[in-house]
């Protein structure tokens, strides 16, 4: 990440204090102790989470929650790899072998095909993490061609179409921001740069999913909320706002919510946008206005662990060490997230969500998301 993304406000304050002759050593020492305590706590809960996955979560076949396909297996092994487990670790080795069993002749990596884009994308990220010796190069090359072929590109949609550049769960039907975010992350994991045409097409869709009235969102929804946040999908038929207060505003706008806000920001950064871009500025302002580690803003407890992962991944991609919230408080987001996840960890080392929406009552899924988030919180 370039220096353009390193907003180290704390460092600027410290330098200014030295210039004014102020003594900041005690404050710095206290901050270092706090970071050290947070890191020790992070290591402890990560170890407990990984132990749960290895001892309880993984099946004899090396999979996790395989009734829903290979997606959770890919997330769990990615979580292990990002938290220091090597490819020779028994849990990781068995999981990787199981994932290879899902590779299809068409290049995709999926189960029954209903979620073939999502499953292939998360598998690509996982195999890229384990690809230090290039053993997965051929699989990843074919997988990249597979998911790129699913995308709504020029052969399927005109660039003026709201769905242009987007990707859905299985390739057919409506695209959404979550799957398009996974798609961008998968391409970046395989060393595709922001200039990749597929990533730039995806950026067009991501920009149309932002509640921002500017030239990048030419849908009818851009001006209805205009708060800089992001929504999940772009309806192409007339909507009735009375059918869902959760999704729609009274004037027919699409409500922004937390996990999509962070997915949008991360996707824009991965697509090469910088802090000077109005889309990024607006996204960062929305995050400042809605900073929260207790809830998924706009969704409450629904999708909470997915939110924690997008929260950490986006703030890490942005190079932010802290977030200045709308109320003027400055938050060390890593310490905040570590403390919150420590308080939510179950006695067996797992995490789970009492809100069953999006299957987060599955301990393997919630634990994988929590561990992936914690991998970005090392201090």
Image (tube, rainbow, N blue to C red):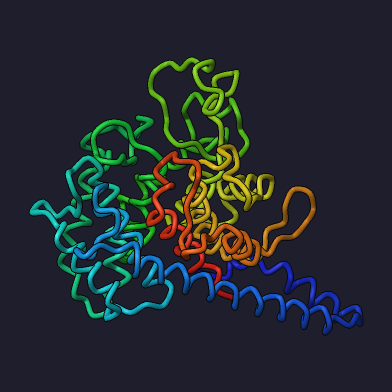
- State the residue at coordinates (23%, 80%): 133
The residue most toward the front is 347
- State the residue at coordinates (51%, 41%): 302
* Whether residue 342 is situated above or below residue 226 in the rendered picture: below
* Residue 298 as seen in the image, left or right of residue 196: right
Q: How far across and how far down the image is residue 325, in percent?
A: 72, 52
Count of marks overlaid on the render: 0
Of residues 297 and 53, which is closer to you in this image?
53
* Residue 347 as seen in the image, left or right of residue 20: left
Q: How far across and how far down the image is residue 313, in percent?
A: 49, 60
Q: Quadrant of residue 95?
A: bottom left
The reply to whether residue 224 is in sight is: yes
Q: How far across and how far down the image is residue 162, in percent?
A: 38, 31
Q: Quadrant of residue 144?
A: bottom left
Of residues 379 and 263, which is closer to you in this image?
379
Q: How far across and how far down the image is residue 306, in percent?
A: 47, 50
* Residue 94 as seen in the image, left or right of residue 28: left
The reply to whether residue 120 is in sight is: no
- State the residue at coordinates (25%, 43%): 115
């Amino acid at each position: 990440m370039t220096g353009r993304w390193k907003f180290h406000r704390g460092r600027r304050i410290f330098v200014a204090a030295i210039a004014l002759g102020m003594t900041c050593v005690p404050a710095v020492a206290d901050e270092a102790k706090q970071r050290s305590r947070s890191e020790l706590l992070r290591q402890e809960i990560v170890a407990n989470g990984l132990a749960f996955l290895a001892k309880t979560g993984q099946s004899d076949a090396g999979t996790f929650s395989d009734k829903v396909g290979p997606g959770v297996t890919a997330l769990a092994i990615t979580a292990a790899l990002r938290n220091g487990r090597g490819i020779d670790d028994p849990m990781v080795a068995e999981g990787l072998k199981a994932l290879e069993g899902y590779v299809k002749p068409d290049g995709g990596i999926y189960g029954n095909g209903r979620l073939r884009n999502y499953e292939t994308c998360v598998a690509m990220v996982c195999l890229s993490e384990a690809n230090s010796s290039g053993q997965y190069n051929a699989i990843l090359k074919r997988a990249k061609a597979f998911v790129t072929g699913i995308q709504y590109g020029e052969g399927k949609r005109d660039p003026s179409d709201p769905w242009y550049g987007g990707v859905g769960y299985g390739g057919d039907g409506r695209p959404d921001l979550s799957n398009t975010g996974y798609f961008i992350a998968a391409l970046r994991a395989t060393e595709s740069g922001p200039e990749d045409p597929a990533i730039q097409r995806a950026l067009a869709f991501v920009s149309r999913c932002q509640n921002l009235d500017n030239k990048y969102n030419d849908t009818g929804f851009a001006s209805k909320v205009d708060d800089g946040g992001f929504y999940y999908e772009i309806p192409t038929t007339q909507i009735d706002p009375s059918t869902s207060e959760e999704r729609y505003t009274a004037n027919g706008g699409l409500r922004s919510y937390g996990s999509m806000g962070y997915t949008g920001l991360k996707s824009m950064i991965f697509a090469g946008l910088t802090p000077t871009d109005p889309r990024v500025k607006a996204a960062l302002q929305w995050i400042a206005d809605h900073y929260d580690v207790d809830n998924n803003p706009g969704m409450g407890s629904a999708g909470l662990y997915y939110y924690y992962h997008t929260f950490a991944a986006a703030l890490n991609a942005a190079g932010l060490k802290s977030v200045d919230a709308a109320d003027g408080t400055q938050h060390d987001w890593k310490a905040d997230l570590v403390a919150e996840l420590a308080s939510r960890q179950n006695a067996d080392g797992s995490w789970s969500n009492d809100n069953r929406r999006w299957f987060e009552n599955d301990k393997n899924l919630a634990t994988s998301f929590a561990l992936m988030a914690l991998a970005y919180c090392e201090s």
